[in-house]
Amino acid sequence: MNPVLLQNLSYEDNNNNNNKSDKPICLICSNPNNASHHFGSTTCLACAAFMRRTVVLKMKYKCKKDNNCLVHFTMRMICRSCRYQRCISSGMKEYLVQKPRTSRTIKGKNENKDVFDKILSNKSNDIKLKERFQNTESPDDDSSVVSSSTFRRGSESSILMLSKGISYHKSSLLTFYIEELRKAQKRRKIFYSDQTTLAMFTDTDSDNIFSIKELTKYNFKELGKNVRFDYMLSYDYVMEHKKIFPSLSNDDCNVLFKYSFLGFSNMDHVFVTLWSKAHKEGLLAFTNRNALSIYNKSFEYDDTLIPETLKEKFIYEPNKKIFHQIILPLSEMDLDIEEFVFLKTLTINSLSRCEFSLSGKKILNEITDELVKCLSEHYKSKNIPIDRLGELILFISNFYTTFQMFTENFITIDTFKLFDIDNEIRQTLKFST
């Protein structure tokens, strides 16, 4: 087993023993964080989400080994079959898992049925989520990793008829969002890396901006600069949408900008962490080259800046939650870039929809319909089961709490004056002035 993993397991087990009397641990993966009652057992949020996906999508698993694999929350790859058996043996009940109530996300008297619910119930875009294949194997070796090469097949230069008859000439709308992500990554590399001017123009497109060797120790004092840069990227992102959808009102653009800012600040570093493989070393990578160790509470900033208790609550605990509830589950799914931009776009749009006008909601529905179509074609070209689409849609809600936590942390920053937050960011996140 990887020595780093053994070290992490040892650290966590010792830490768990010290805290056994203080708080419950997950009965499936031994995670000591946020374990509570789910579906008849005491589990962490990640295992509860795993059980929910398994039941809702009717997934079946087959262990490649002896049905006795180690299941521990620090592991990057966990045998799904053995994890499911641990769920059942710990007392979790399938009948306690309810179908997600997507109607809570979108409210309105005369709205059509939620498009996500249509997808899951096989009523939209001619997509049928086939009954789960009976021999799903756990991804416990490199052969199970899905290729991350960009999908550029399908109809050549198809014309997408968008709002008010405006035609946008692209190979696919999914390609547009991939290009937007890569453009943001390139700008970050120029802004944060040590590359020469020549390298800026000779460097080829890459799905990731930094290798694990380029990562630097987490510096809290750089957070303000990083947030402002994400703010600028979010503005560019909205303006590109305005070109494609000129009927978007200024009010709708303002809403999209707010949730795009949360998306760039809270989702892109997930992409960087996964693609740099930093999570294998217990690291959470950020878009400004900083990296935070999940198992080592040392940070590179002035210790007098904030008290120890606030460091734990404000920096370590939130990022540890992201690592275990977002990073590790997504690493099991082995997302390619198409799936990541699909997940990011639909997360931003689903939150924006709550505050959009009726005409704006129609545009968001068009985007969703087209992205579902594009990703379905991508799956078909790669011989990937279409029901994986349902797994992605179910994962969207995991980011809602992350966005909320980010906003609450910025209120803390503003309250303690840890660094200056621009008035524009206050207004975007609707802080009280």
Image: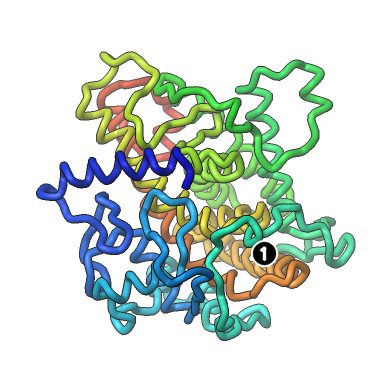
Please tell me which residue is depicted at 64% across the width and 42% down the height of the picture.
237
Give left or right: position of 385 versus 25. right
Q: Nearer the viewer, residue 330 or 140?
A: 140
Vertical order, 233 against 157 (above or below): above
> In what quadrant of the picture does the C terminus appear?
top left
| Quarter residue 167 falls in | bottom right
| Quarter residue 37 falls in | bottom left
Give left or right: position of 279 versus 294. right
Residue 50 pos. (x, y %):
41, 66
Residue 143 pos. (x, y %):
66, 60
| Quarter residue 385 falls in | bottom right
Residue 271 pos. (x, y %):
57, 45
Please tell me which residue is depicted at 55% across the width and 27% down the height of the picture.
215
Give left or right: position of 117 versus 45. right
Query: Mark 1 Cα within 10 Å, few/some/many (few <14, many 20+)?
Result: many
Please tell me which residue is depicted at 29% across the width and 79% down the height of the picture.
93
Q: Nearer the viewer, residue 91 or 320?
A: 91
Local SS, label 1: helix
In the picture of the structure, the residue carrying the numbered disc 1 is 371
Please tell me which residue is depicted at 39% across the width and 79% down the height of the picture.
99
Q: Nearer the viewer, residue 345 or 329?
A: 329
